[in-house]
């Protein structure tokens, strides 16, 4: 039996006050998709569960000159097709389509998916690819942290006691010359990814790469930037030559994944190569299309 107090604040400040009051024993619950597994399996024994289901102001998706702000409570299903209104979220929207199943996506929130910090998270890889950041609010103030600094290890984040993740900001980019893409490999529909790769490219009119990000998922505890592969592309013409294949080779040469029940280390390395090439090709096609 799970023996804890279940609290339902209705504002961010009330939620933060409860988190501060109950300290380490208090845990946030959003859609409950991971939390219910942790509780059922006795992996955590919180004294207080602070549900954010009824906290207002965390469910909006809004665009400004700086980018798109997504509230922590936005469910994964709501993100499917969100690129119709917010085209810079295309890669995120496409990635979410393949996450878990319809029932889980109906409850699972973006904030919960980020805070879970699963090493095979598709969402954190895409958000890193898009250079996103999160806002963390507590009773004593607020701070903004990049996704890269937020996810610190497998199932570990930079959230401090008393903090609530309230929103995610995805910076804007020029859709006429830049694009992002995400490719994943799964053994069965609904499974976590064996490997996922996100890419972002920005090109000039001659096909020269002005900016690039390549992020590899599930080859280490956190999403990992493939800097050697990025170095092969940045500042070079990458259209109609071997550049993307070279980048795939370099990304694969610089990962050292552990094998797991889904795939051996060697297989994951091969996947990094193939998925990097495919995700780059898709991003380049979108950026030049
Ligand atoms: C069967 C299954 C398959 C899955 N497959 C995939 C997949 O293929 N790809 C993928 O990327 N993900 C996958 N997931 C992960 C899924 O996306 C997350 O479990 C889900 O999004 C978590 O969201 P939630 O709202 O239910 O979080 P909860 O379970 O409520 O919380 C998760 C964690 O985050 C904390 N938390 C939640 N919200 C906040 C907040 N606003 N501020 C601070 N802390 C917070 C909680 O305290 C808890 O530690 C899968 C999950 C399941 C159960």
Image (cartoon, rainbow, N blue to C red):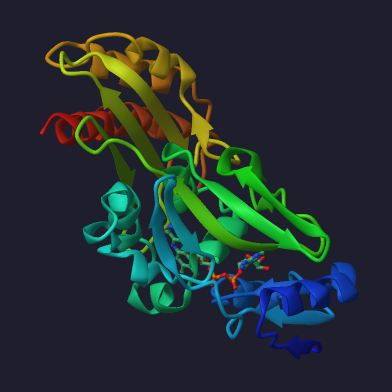
Residue 227, relative to residue 95: is it above or below?
Answer: above
- Can see residue 45? no
Q: Where residue 29 sits: x, y (%)?
A: 65, 76
Q: Position of residue 246 (x, y in %)?
A: 29, 13
Name the one closer to the observer, 57 or 72: 57
Rendered image quadrant of residue 289: top left
Quadrant (top left, top right, bottom left, bottom right) of the N terminus = bottom right
- At x 25% / y 63%, what residue is drawn? 81
Q: Residue furthest front?
A: 65
Q: Quadrant of ligand 1?
A: bottom right
Q: Is residue 46 shown above or below 199?
A: below
| Rendered position, 70 above or below 287 | below
Q: Nearer the viewer, residue 276 or 88?
A: 88
Q: For the image shown, how many numbered marks are present on the structure? A: 0
| Image position of 36 (left or right of 120) | right
Residue 55 visible within the image: yes
x, y (%) of residue 279? 27, 35
Pick whichever, 124 or 65, lies toward us. Answer: 65
Q: Residue at x 54, y 74 (%)?
A: 33
Measuring 22% from the left and 15% from the top, which residue is drawn there? 238
Image quadrant assignment for residue 285 = top left
Image coordinates for residue 184, horizontal then vertical, percent: 33, 45
Q: Is residue 265 above or below residue 40?
A: above
């Amino acid at each position: 039996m799970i023996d804890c107090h279940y609290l339902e604040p209705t504002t961010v400040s009330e939620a933060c006050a409860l988190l501060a009051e109950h300290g380490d024993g208090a845990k946030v619950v959003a859609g409950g998709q991971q939390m219910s597994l942790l509780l059922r399996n006795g992996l955590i024994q919180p004294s207080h569960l602070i549900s954010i289901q009824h906290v207002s102001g965390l469910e909006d998706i809004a665009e400004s000159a700086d980018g798109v702000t997504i509230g922590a409570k936005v469910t994964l299903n709501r993100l499917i097709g969100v690129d119709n209104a917010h085209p810079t979220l295309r890669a995120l929207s496409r990635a979410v389509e393949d996450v878990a199943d319809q029932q889980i996506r109906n409850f699972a929130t973006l904030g919960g998916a980020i805070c879970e910090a699963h090493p095979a998270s598709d969402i954190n890889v895409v958000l890193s690819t898009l250079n996103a950041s999160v806002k963390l609010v507590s009773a004593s103030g607020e701070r903004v942290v990049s996704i890269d600094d937020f996810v610190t290890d497998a199932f570990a984040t930079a959230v401090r006691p008393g903090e609530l993740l309230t929103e995610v900001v995805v910076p804007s980019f020029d859709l006429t010359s830049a694009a992002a893409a995400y490719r994943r490999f799964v053994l069965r529909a609904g499974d976590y990814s064996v490997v996922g790769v996100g890419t972002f490219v920005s090109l000039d009119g001659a096909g020269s790469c002005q900016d690039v990000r390549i992020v590899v998922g599930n080859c280490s505890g956190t999403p990992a930037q493939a800097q050697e592969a990025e170095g092969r592309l940045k500042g070079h013409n990458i259209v109609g030559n071997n550049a993307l294949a070279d980048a795939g080779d370099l990304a694969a040469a610089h990962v050292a994944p552990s094998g797991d029940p889904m795939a051996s280390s060697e297989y994951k390395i091969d996947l990094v190569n193939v998925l990097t090439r495919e995700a780059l090709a898709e991003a380049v096609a979108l950026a030049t299309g």
